[in-house]
Amino acid sequence: MKPNTQFRLNSMPRLFISHQDLEKIKYVVDLAPKEAQWFSRVEKVKTKSTTYYRVFDMFIPEQYCSSAEVESDPMMLVNFYKELKEKYGTEETNEIMKNMTVWSHSHHNMGVSPSGHDIRQCNENIEN
């Protein structure tokens, strides 16, 4: 996986998420008795004075959840793609997948810093 932009050293990327999309996230986190995961889309937006990244949409794949971990196995992800394709058609699904680059999950009742499991899972996703 390669980055799709360059960040300047010592600068933080600016993220924008609508109130509606934030409420969807809160709803899933409140509803889930354990951890939960979802994917979102992101697009780079340039204005005259700044550049920011808009995070939008929420797609929830089938998943295994515990109070400490959440993940989807490869077959679940294949089924997830098939569900998207059935709902949106092949062409639109492929467009959605192009910018579905945000993987998020709750940490149930734990802190928000990346855990050792998060780091391992990200590395496995990059390798696969």
Image (tube, helix red, strand yellow):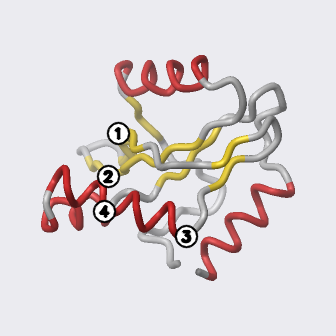
Front tag of 1 and 2: 1
Residue 82's place in the image compared with 16, above or below, is below
Q: Which residue is mark 1?
A: 56
- Tell me the number on the disc at residue 115: none
Q: Which residue is mark 4?
A: 82
Q: Which residue is mark 2?
A: 43
Q: Earlier in the sequence, mark 4 or mark 3?
A: 3
Q: CA distance from mark 2 to mark 3?
A: 26 Å
Tag 1–tag 4 contact (CB < 8 Å): no
Residue 62's place in the image compared with 92, above or below, is above
Q: Which residue is mark 3?
A: 74
Q: CA distance from mark 1 to mark 2?
A: 8 Å
**Residue in view at x 75 percent, y 29 percent:** 108
Q: Amino acid at mark 4?
A: Lys
**Residue in view at x 35 percent, y 44 percent:** 50
Q: Amino acid at mark 1?
A: Phe
Tag 4–tag 3 contact (CB < 8 Å): no
Q: Position of residue 81 (x, y in %)?
A: 35, 62
SS class, disc 1: strand
Q: Earlier in the sequence, mark 3 or mark 1?
A: 1
Q: Quadrant of residue 35?
A: top right
